[in-house]
């Protein structure tokens, strides 16, 4: 690792998390953020060439195939981008003795646990997206690179395709909406993920220099829990005095009344105790973070 300011390579620069990372990581070094034109995760040669040219000290991989339903019928692309590419990135990072930060998902669990998931619980994805993300985790671990895998959930923010923006659009158009109330999890603001990542990168670089760094998998979400219906209701409440909404009724429905190509786990609740302890963090409540995000956006 160089003695000067570290070079930090961010993939997926136009994604929800990648966009925020460019801002959050700026004080830590030279951030080089790329999209698929510079590094196409579907093409291993393109990954190797870009990493060899940029020679990063840290790689933060925020690029992924995130279309959960489409992944069921587009399995080859999902596996290449989520399952294989992270391993290639990891191999290249290992050659440079760089640190790899990678994001994964609550969808590695099947959601049948009666309680909150911890990182050591068994994985058993119920959809192909989850399976491909789990393959990516395993590919990284197999290389022995210095890495942190951060499993997050229900990501939203002020850009990209996400539940918050979809709900705001629908609530302006419709008087009634049906929203699933039997999937439990924690909405997480993309900016929170980026800011926590910056803290983690800072501490990890120090640990690496002191030869005290330990790789691992951590959950990274806001604190607290809700359902999609609870999330939608909070959005309506927070937007009510700022936007002209048509919405009058948000009905609770079970997952069975909203069939999708990909199955989703009913229990997506994941504990953040481990990350909070290792990196001295306080993860804000999901509804407080949502209020800040909406204040910013609206
Ligand atoms: N969104 C969620 O609810 C959620 C939940 C749990 C975990 N995660 C994980 O969190 C991380 C960040 O997700 P996000 O919500 O920020 O995703 P996102 O907004 O969908 O962004 C993903 C980014 O990946 C890029 N990408 C896709 N295919 C690529 C390819 N072949 N080569 C290079 N770049 C490619 C996209 O580029 P284009 O803009 O060009 O398409 C996009 O910029 C991912 O690892 C995701 O699996 C997300």
Image (spheres, grey):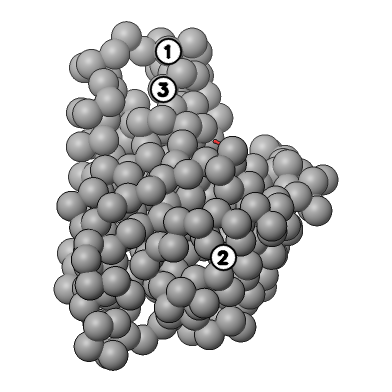
* Secondary-structure class at tag 1: helix
Of circles 1 and 2, which is in front?
2
* Residue 84 location (% of width, % of height): 69, 64
* Residue sitting nearer the eye, 41 or 29: 29
* Residue sitting nearer the eye, 227 or 55: 55
- Discs 1, 3 touching: Cβ within 8 Å: yes
> What residue appears at the point 80 percent right and 53 percent down from the top-left corner?
76
Using the image, determine if residue 231 lies above or below residue 58.
above
User: Residue 107, located in which quarter of the rendered image?
Assistant: bottom right
Of circles 3 and 2, which is in front?
2
* Residue 68 location (% of width, % of height): 65, 47
Q: Is mark 3 within 8 Å of ligand 1?
A: no
- Discs 1, 2 touching: Cβ within 8 Å: no
Residue 149 can be seen in this image:
no
Q: Residues within 10 Å of mark 3 (few under 14, many from 20)?
A: some
Residue 93 can be seen in this image:
yes
Residue matched to label 3: 168
> What residue appears at the point 70 percent right and 51 percent down from the top-left corner?
42
**Given the current orientation, which residue lies at the most extreme bottom position?**
211
Residue matched to label 2: 89
Can you say which quadrant of the picture contains the N terminus? bottom left
- Who comes first in sequence, dot 3 or dot 2? 2
Q: Is mark 2 within 8 Å of ligand 1?
A: no
* Residue sitting nearer the eye, 84 or 280: 84
In the picture, measured across the screen, residue 65 lies left or right of residue 252, that is right
> What residue appears at the point 28 percent right and 52 percent down from the top-left corner?
30
* Secondary-structure class at tag 2: helix
Using the image, determine if residue 218 lies above or below residue 23.
below
Name the mark on residue 47.
Answer: none
Residue matched to label 1: 172
* Residue 21 location (% of width, % of height): 33, 48
Q: Residues within 10 Å of mark 2 (few under 14, many from 20)?
A: many
């Amino acid at each position: 690792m160089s003695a000067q300011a570290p070079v930090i390579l961010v993939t997926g620069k136009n994604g929800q998390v990648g966009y925020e990372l460019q801002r959050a990581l700026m004080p830590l070094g030279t951030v080089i953020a790329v999209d698929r034109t510079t590094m196409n995760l579907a093409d291993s040669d393109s990954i190797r060439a870009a990493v060899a040219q940029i020679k990063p000290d840290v790689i933060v991989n925020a690029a992924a195939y995130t279309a959960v339903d489409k992944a069921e019928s587009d399995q080859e692309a999902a596996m290449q981008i989520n399952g294989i590419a992270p391993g290639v990135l990891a191999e290249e990072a290992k050659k440079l003795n760089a640190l790899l930060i990678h994001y994964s998902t609550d969808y590695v669990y099947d959601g049948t646990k009666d309680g909150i998931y911890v990182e050591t619980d068994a994985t058993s994805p119920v959809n192909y997206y989850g399976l491909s993300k789990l393959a990516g985790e395993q590919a990284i671990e197999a290389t022995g690179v210095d890495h942190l895998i951060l499993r997050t959930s229900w990501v939203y923010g002020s850009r990209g395709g996400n539940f918050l923006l979809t709900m705001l659009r629908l609530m302006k158009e419709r008087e009634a909406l049906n929203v699933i109330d039997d999937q439990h999890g924690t909405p997480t603001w993309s900016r929170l993920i980026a800011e926590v990542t910056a803290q983690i990168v800072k501490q990890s670089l120090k640990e690496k220099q002191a030869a005290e760094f330990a790789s691992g998998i951590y959950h990274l979400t806001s604190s607290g829990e809700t359902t999609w219906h609870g999330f939608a209701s909070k959005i309506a409440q927070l937007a009510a005095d700022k936007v002209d909404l048509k919405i009058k009724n948000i009905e609770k429905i079970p997952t069975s009344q909203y069939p999708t190509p990909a199955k989703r786990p009913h229990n997506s609740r994941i504990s953040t105790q481990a990350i909070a302890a290792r990196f001295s963090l306080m993860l804000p409540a999901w509804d407080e973070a949502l209020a800040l995000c909406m204040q910013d956006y609206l």
